[in-house]
Amino acid sequence: MTVETRVDDQPRVLYAPPELLADRSTTYCPGCGHGVVHRLVAEVLGELGLGPRTIAVAPVGCSVFAYDFLELDFVEAPHGRAPAVATGIRRVMPDAFVLTYQGDGDLAAIGTGEIVHAAARGEAITAVFVNNGIYGMTGGQMAPTTLVGQRTTSCPNGRDPAFAGAPIPMTEMLAVLPGVAYAARGSVVDASSIGRTKQYLKKACQVQLDRAGFAIVEVLSNCPIGWGMTPVESIEHLRDAVAPVYPPGVIVDRTAPARGG
Amino acid sequence: MTAVAERPADAPFARRTRVLRKGNEAIAEAAIRAGCDAYFGYPITPQAELLEWMARRMPQEGRAFVQAESELGAINMGLGAAACGKRVLVSSSSPGMSLMAEAMSYMAGSEVPIVVVNVMRGGPGLGSIGPGQGDYWQATRGHGHGDYRLPVLAPSSIGEAMDLVAASFEIAERYRTPVILLADGILGQAMEPVEETYRTPPRLAADWALTGADGRPPRVVKSLHLKPEALEQHNRHLRAKEAAIRDAEVRWAGERLDDADLAIVAYGTAARVARTAIARARESGMRVGLFRPITLWPFPDAELRHLATQVRGFLVLEMSAGQMLDDVRLALEGARPIAFHGRTGGMVPMPGEVVAALHRLENRTGGPAR
Amino acid sequence: MERSVIFSGFGGQGLLFAGQVLAQAAMAEDREVLWIPSYGPEMRGGTAYCTVIVSEEPVGSPIVERPDVAVVLNPPSHAKFAHTVVPNGVVVTNASLVDSRVEREDVSEIALPLSELASAAGDPRLVSVVALGVVAARTGIVLAGSVHRALVDIVGRKRPQVLDMDVAAFDAGIRAAGGRPIAEILRDEARALDATLRETVPVGREP
């Protein structure tokens, strides 16, 4: 859908789908944040002119279908292995732009080894990490990022840190590695945070183009169905309960001092 | 003394130019000469020298080398590079191969060509670092989950391993499938003289490979087909491909079969033991030959069945508790008696044990032929 | 005919290297050969060993039950391997470290102070090269000249600065075993070869 208005009789486009976003109905649940993140990725890659150079890696989880919505070359990685797959691409395709898109079960649970070592090697990869605190595709089980007390189908009485440990601040963990040039956390809470998230993503892409190191942007997202909430309630929860545990902002930026000498 | 030391190292006898090379290193160099663009691995005995050779040589050639964080990392790096249409080698040994099972299945499903070397050791579990053939079932039954099979090539000497590296890349790319080169600790660790003749298979047009969707529709390399009808259709396609491989790629070698009335069926290092045992058995008047499968999948079943019209019995010799034995039974369909001798855990059968097993088989099949 | 030699001792005594030199010498005579190490944790202590099988035919079984020649450089390997040689086999024993001897009538045991000879040549770690000289002088598995050339080739490529020492150690082994100096052996081999060359061209064993 394109929205136009007229100023001085000249058409002015207020809203148009990014070229890299497929003209296709979404298969994500109503209110799911993946659609917003997909759009941001498509906008940023489009604005940087990277679509024709991009080889993207899809994860296992809800966002495995990223390849249906983004008009990019895609390879589907086994669960958690996207950073290793991306490393293989990176090492043989010097001119490609390499993007991974992973959820929190994929990146912060089964794929911890791969993400840590890709980051440690400083692979010139841009990782998009969508954190909605739950395993959506398999029916709403506890993820490593699930909040303390949050009920899921595999912690029906709420996450108890005595049994399940505390939520993992994955991006902060990665940020301590010298190979990580840039790490930031955005969210899909509202228009301004979505705008900031887009700026983080753009910076994370530029970091790869500059071969400055590994770049990751975590995006706090919602899962209304998995959380048992309406879309509006889920956004409120994201703002009031999730964001305080995972504070948005730039977590590390090693590009500035490197450039300044 | 210096004058002596400076004598040229020319060998007055040698008519052939050969070099002495360790199996792991020979496989690695053969892969490089076959045009391998990228290698990914993780240290594990008894294949570590393959990784080390690549660590030194691949950067010299301006090609990709990564020592991965695990075999999971290595095989998935392989998946990524191979999905871009590059010629990729990954190697490991038995326990590491188990970690690779998931990605092997993904690559079979998404039709990604890659060559994976397994320098087998004793199992199960952490097992031993001695040579073994206990991964036959794993390799020939597809290696990972799901309904598919992969070509498996088994060299019996270091020179043959070098030839089969190039052949493995060729088969992998022709059929868009992972190929397993199945060696063992002996072949990895031993040194033999080899001729430095290498082959670089021609590159096929990879109209499926990921290069960036520049001026063409996006490509997706994937194994997910959520609709059962679509997945069944995809599986039919894989079956058809496997049928084509069965038709065209079966390899085996026979030795001293012309007058044989007993045959040993063995591959890899076990086939070498069989060769020594056969020489000894023939000294005592037994007429024994060797049937050596080189492709373990597709198994040379028609060829073995044909041999059953000539010989009276078969001895299957393996460095396992009896795995290829299954395929021999399937091929022979009860046509002839089948005996088995195997050693496990990293033990290698001794020729004397094999000769004794031949005598038992001979008695079972009606005594010495006249 | 297939002949096998096992080199055994401590890790660090150059066993794998000596086996490799022998293997290359056999290869240079256009013969088939297989070199196989023990590749386990035992490499880091206790006994380490490698086996070299030399044959006119492609080598079959990579594991030999009973070697033709056992080079034993320390007491544990003497206990483990010396008695395993074939009837009329040869045991080369490092008398510098090994006191016991093989109690078999059908074994020819050559016990020499190999470590001391190596030290005299310049480095006690050359003990395997001294042993190689003994093997070359006393077993006839390959020509001494072939072993010499392989030694010169391998050491010359990898560590040319110690080549003289290696050749001295090899020569010490040959002479301790009753052989003539390597320089004389090489000269005679070359003469014999020239004579053969004049008779039949090309020379060499069939592979």
Image (cartoon, helix red, strand yellow):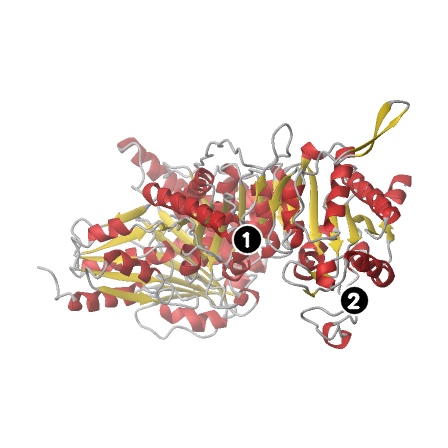
Q: Tell me the kind of residue under disc 1.
A: Ala
In screen coordinates, is C133 left or right of A10? left
Q: CA distance from mark 1 to mark 2?
A: 32 Å
Q: Chain of mark 1?
A: B
Evaluate whether residue B259 shows in this view.
yes
* Residue situated in front as seen by the camera: C187 or A123: A123
Residue that mark 2 sits on: A147
Q: Are marks 1 and 2 in contact (CB under 8 Å)?
A: no
At 85% from the left and 50% from the top, the residue drawn is A190
In screen coordinates, is A53 left or right of B271? right
Q: Residues within 10 Å of mark 2 (few under 14, many from 20)?
A: many
Q: Chain of mark 2?
A: A
Residue that mark 1 sits on: B103
* Percent position of residue B80, x then y: 60, 45
Evaluate whether residue B55 shows in this view.
no
- Label placed on residue A223: none
